[in-house]
Amino acid sequence: MSFATYKILHLSGVLMIFLAVGGMLVAARAKEAAAAFKAGLGILHGLGLALVMIAGFGLLAKSGAGFPGWVLVKIIIWLIFGGLIAILKRKPELGQTLLWTSTALGIIAVIMAVAKPF
């Protein structure tokens, strides 16, 4: 696949993750959120995580950059986003904190991808 295709897939996955996390934040706070809605968000979250990882490594391979430190930071952020569902299911009262945490992590991931500081 081309670099542009990997980039489109990668950014599409990022969008899916943020949509799913946002939906889960709302669903976690709703007293009677439908189980099907939550299941759909879980699927969207998982697909987004898979797309981000596969396309991200495709981008890395196409760029020929090797495995710089900023990639490790992005993998750690990816792992944290993967665990957000479990945290929200067990502690829905942390929704506000997780909203700002996920926003900050997203910004850090963007900085790592654009600035490539190390």
Image (cartoon, rainbow, N blue to C red):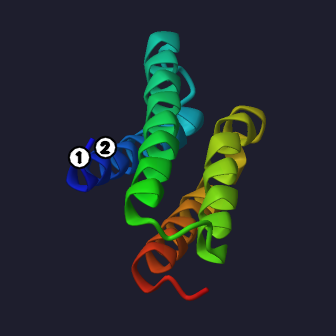
40 left or right, relative to 8: right
Secondary structure beneath dot 1 equals helix
Query: Of all residues shown, which one is farthest toward the front?
Result: 64
Kindly identify the residue that appears in the image at 47 percent across and 80 percent down. 111
- Does residue 28 sit above or below 36 in this rendering? below
Label 2 vs label 1, nearer the camera? 1
Q: Which residue is mark 2?
A: 9
Residue drawn at point x = 62 percent, y = 66 percent = 67
In the rendered structure, find residue 5 and report the number of the disc placed on it: 1
Query: Where is residue 118, by image quadrant?
Result: bottom right
- Depth check: 66 or 98 in front? 66
> Left or right: where does residue 112 sit relative to residue 83?
left
Identity of the amino acid at label 2?
Leu
* Residue 95 percent coordinates (x, y): 62, 51
Q: Are the residues at dot 2 and dot 1 in contact (C-beta closer than 8 Å)?
A: yes
Depth order, front residue of 45/110: 110
